[in-house]
Image (spheres, rainbow, N blue to C red):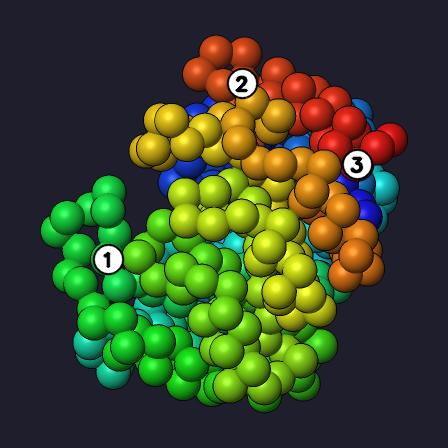
Amino acid sequence: MKKAIVIRAFSENPDFLGRADWLASEEDFLRCFDKAVEAGFEGVQLFIDREGYFSLASDLKVAERIAAGAQRAGVSLASLEIAPFSYSLTDDDPTVREEGCKTIARAMEVAAAMGVRGVLVIPGWVGLPWNPAAKTVRYDIAYERTRDGLKAVAPTAERLGVSANLEPIWNRFLLSPLEVRGLLDEVGSEGVGLLLDTGNLIQFGYPEQWIRILGPRIKDVHFKDFRQSVGTVDGFVNLLEGDVNWPEVMAALREIHYDGFVIAEMFPYKFYGDTILKHTSVSMDRILGR
């Protein structure tokens, strides 16, 4: 398994939903890559929004230059995250859902140009507990729309050799590994898989069980920890400080012969933010048995 971290860990903004508009030039990316290597990471997960220097709207040559810079720095590009909730496959408006499919397809084109094998996809929601104003979607309808949207992007994924990787989050949706397995099997494409986030699952399950049940459908893994006694987003804590059973998670990953990236989704501290890099790197080395 290869050790990676999200590029937003290099930000000065500790907000876990923070954007990446501070990455305004090739040099900004190169600084992140150099810091990643210095901290002992082998990969970086990129972040793409609709606008900005590196965005869905920018020329693919920008993406290619960033990829070349990563190669020079000696770091792999582990995954590509589309800005959360900037698109939706579950919205009531079919035009919004169609645009969501186009957004995912464009992100996969960018990923292919960079040699990135997976795009993180958050399909939408049934509800958002931190945003009561968000309109709820009936569960079965959200499921059907997600399945149809993933089927629509699957041919593009297969053609480009890039996987659209579904991530279950706190959106009151995809709450069971059996449900996720059924959804992915209904889509039935090697171009659509799962990004499993260990911390996200603690509130409603056991990551090690999800791993064993979903097996080869898992294309990427987020390492994150969560303390159940807190029970809110403030419960996301540093690796090894929460309730994730790391020995069991690692045993399960080895059982399914997972050999891809494990990506720390961590964000900078309020003060001396870059200290999170070393702390996370050391914790990951212990988890990985290095």
Image vertical order of residue 98 relative to residue 64, above or below: below
**Amino acid tagged 3:** Leu
Residue lying farthest left? 133
- Looking at the rendered image, the quarter that the C terminus falls into is top right
Mark 2 packing: few (<14 Cα in 10 Å), some, or many (20+)?
A: some
Looking at the rendered image, the disc whose residue lies closer to the viewer, 2 or 3, is 3
Image vertical order of residue 230 relative to residue 156, above or below: above
Residue at which label 3 appears: 288
Q: At numbered mark 2, what does the secondary structure look like: helix, strand or loop?
A: loop
Q: Residue 206 in the image: x percent, y percent?
A: 53, 48
Give residue 15's mark. none
- State the residue at coordinates (71%, 69%): 216
Residue at which label 2 appears: 273
Q: At numbered mark 3, what does the secondary structure look like: helix, strand or loop?
A: helix
Of labels 3 and 1, earlier in sequence is 1
Mark 1 packing: few (<14 Cα in 10 Å), some, or many (20+)?
A: some
Front-most of 2 and 243? 243
